[in-house]
Amino acid sequence: MSEKNTKNEKKPNLKDENMLAALAHVSALFLPVLVPLVIWLLHKDKSGYVQYQSKQALVFQVASWAAVSILSVVATVLSFFCIGVLLWPILIAIGFGAALYSIYACWETLNGRPFSYAYVDEVLGGR
């Protein structure tokens, strides 16, 4: 009887897991925070790989969004004193850097390779 159960059990599809993990990362370009949160909530008990990657993407996107938001406010306030103009190139570089890093993470996870953002793994307490 146990043989039947193991044959009928649905095995995880690695391509689907890779696709979901990649979607969590690349969502930084179109629906940041929302997509990785939904993926994490739906798959936190189903797939360790998808759960880990979506949590990584979520924390990275929240941190990136917070950094860009705070720097935008500071740059806007300092623009009244003509100093903030110097921060706008840094702000743009952070935005592009975060987008490129998310695309790289998407590529890595789409190909089934484990990926961790720098420092995010430490924040999450390791795998």
Image (spheres, rainbow, N blue to C red):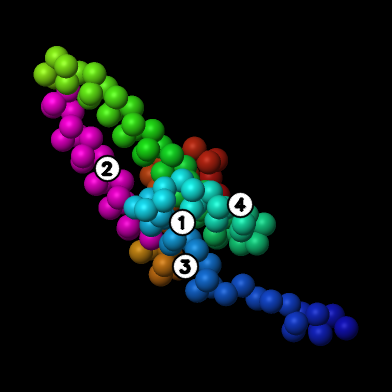
Instruction: Decide which of tag 2 and tag 4 comes sooner along the chain.
Output: 4
Instruction: Decide which of tag 3 and tag 1 comes sooner along the chain.
Output: 3
SS of the residue under disc 4: helix
Regarding residue 120, the answer to whether it shows in the image is: no
Where does the magenta region start and end?
Answer: 84-106
Camera-side residue of 32 and 11: 32
Residue 24 - label:
1
SS of the residue under disc 3: helix
Instruction: Decide which of tag 3 and tag 2 comes sooner along the chain.
Output: 3
Residue 95 - label:
2
Return the residue at label 3.
19
Camera-side residue of 69 and 116: 69
| Disc 3 + disc 2, Cβ < 8 Å | no
| Disc 1 + disc 4, Cβ < 8 Å | no
| Disc 2 + disc 1, Cβ < 8 Å | no
Query: 127 above or below 111?
Result: above
Tell whether 14 sits left or right of 31: right
Residue type pointed to by label 2: Gly
State whether the magenta stretch is mostly helix, strand or loop. helix
